[in-house]
Amino acid sequence: MPLFEIETESHIIITWADGESAAREVVKANYPRENPIRVTRRPRDTWVISKAALGISNGFDPCHIARDCLAKAAGDKIHAIRLYMQETGTDLERARKVIESNMVMGW
């Protein structure tokens, strides 16, 4: 079964599907308010994401640090953002995005 990359306004979904129409159905079933912008059949059966492209390099893992800050803050988002800014030296907007992303993932 081929691997597909489906891009919507808010997501990039990677899924196995029998064909393009089946890949589109995955979006319809899971994100009914979103329409596929781009559907691409991947040339191989694996997916690779560059850590450097995500800003994770030289042992710096923003998700690990964010989860640690959330644990220290007992889930208090504002406190976790402040802790993240203090530990990483990042600005408020970036800290907010990282903390909120990790809250969604269920730190």
Image (tube, rainbow, N blue to C red):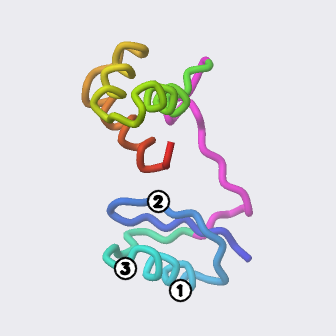
Q: Which residues are magenta?
A: 41-58
Residue 43 point in image, percent of width and height: 68, 63
Closer to the camera in the image, 23 or 89: 89
Residue at mark 2: 12
Could you give the CA–CA distance between mark 3 and mark 1, rounded to whole angstroms? 15 Å
Amino acid type, callout 3 = Pro
Q: Residue at x 55, y 27 (%)?
A: 61
Give the mark, 2 or 1, whose residue is nearer the N terminus: 2
Q: How far apart are the two marked residues, 2 and 1, measured between alpha carbons?
A: 16 Å
- Depth check: 18 or 81 in front? 81
Are discs 3 and 2 less than 8 Å apart at CB?
A: no
| Foreground label between 3 and 1 | 3
Q: Which mark is residue 60?
A: none
Label placed on residue 21? 1
**Amino acid of disc 2:** Ile
- Determine the main secondary structure of the stretch shown in magenta: loop
- Name the image quarter holding residue 73: top left
Badges 2 and 1: C-beta atoms under 8 Å apart? no
Q: CA distance from mark 3 to mark 2?
A: 14 Å
At horizontal 66% and vertical 54% (from top left) the residue drawn is 47
Magenta stretch contains residue 28? no
